[in-house]
Image: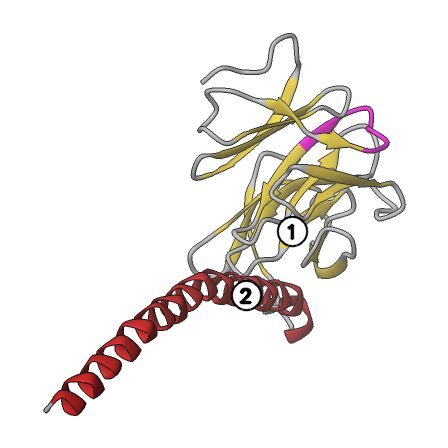
């Protein structure tokens, strides 16, 4: 693995061969070969620093700020990004992706916030006084969090609503339509070829018919 030169990176996320690294100066670097090489992603209105990044299997990737309560969102697996500075009204920490396709962060006042796309967030749970710094999902559907006191606490989130899953389903349908169109186009040349062959055979048939008529007359 080769890290981008002269960059102070603060967080990294990977899925398969795709690797996204973020850091000081709002830099976002992307790798498609497991981290052997990186290219800088296109970022509009780059923030001062990004300190957390996570993604989902359908290509949605989210990063959060360190010195600003902001979020950067990508819908194309980290190729291009949009930075939003009016999403959070407080500091947020511990960005993670959940098994159901949502994202979760913990607020400075102990709130747990969730989002299906990184652009709109809602409060899913409230902590009783602890300030949470980091999160990770467990196999039983709960979240394990670290507090400022160095304690581990377990928190339960409500299940995702149908509206939270809608964007992913719509994306999957769109991909299926594109694939169907591509398959139909690929079949068209084959059909045209078969038609051309059939046409090419027609003169031969006509020739054979003509010869048969000549023989019949000769008899």
Q: Is residue 56 above or below residue 14?
A: below
Residue 9's quadrant in the figure? top right
Asked if one can make out residue 173 in the rendered structure from this viewpoint, the answer is: yes
Q: Is residue 217 above or below residue 203?
A: below
Membership of 13 in magenta stretch: no
**Image quarter of the C terminus:** bottom left
Most frequent secondary structure within the magenta stretch: loop
The one nearer the camera, 63 or 40, is 40
Magenta residues span 44-51
SS of the residue under disc 1: strand
User: Would you say residue 147 is visible in this rendering?
Assistant: no
Q: Pinpoint residue 93: horizontal percent, then vertical percent.
A: 70, 39
Q: Residue at x 45, y 61 (%)?
A: 189
Q: Determine which of the numbered discs, if any, sits on residue 104 in the image.
A: 1
**Magenta span includes 48:** yes
Residue 151 in the figure: left or right of residue 91? left
Q: Earlier in the sequence, mark 2 or mark 1?
A: 1
Q: Which residue is mark 2?
A: 181
Task: Residue at the far front: name it.
Answer: 218
In the rendered view, tell whether residue 149 sits above or below residue 215. Answer: above
Give the camera-side residue of 42 and 161: 42
């Amino acid at each position: 693995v080769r890290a981008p030169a002269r960059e102070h990176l603060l967080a990294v996320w990977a899925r398969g061969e795709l690797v996204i690294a973020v850091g000081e100066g709002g830099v976002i670097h992307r790798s498609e070969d497991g981290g052997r090489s990186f290219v800088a992603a296109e970022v509009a209105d780059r923030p001062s620093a990004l300190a957390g990044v996570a993604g989902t299997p359908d290509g949605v990737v989210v990063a959060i700020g360190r010195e600003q309560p902001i979020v950067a969102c990508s819908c194309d697996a980290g190729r291009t990004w949009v930075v939003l500075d009016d999403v959070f009204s407080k500091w947020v920490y511990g960005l993670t992706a959940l098994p159901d396709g949502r994202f979760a962060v913990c607020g400075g006042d102990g709130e747990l916030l969730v989002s299906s796309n990184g652009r709109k967030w809602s409060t899913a749970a409230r902590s009783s006084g602890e300030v949470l710094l980091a999160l990770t999902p467990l196999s039983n559907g709960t979240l394990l969090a670290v507090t400022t006191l160095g304690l581990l606490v377990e928190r339960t989130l409500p299940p995702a609503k149908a509206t939270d899953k809608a964007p992913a389903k719509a994306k999957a349908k769109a991909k299926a339509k594109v694939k169907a169109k591509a398959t139909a186009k690929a079949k068209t040349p084959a059909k045209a070829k078969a038609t051309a062959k059939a046409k090419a055979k027609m003169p031969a048939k006509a020739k054979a018919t003509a010869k048969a008529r000549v023989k019949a007359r000769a008899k």
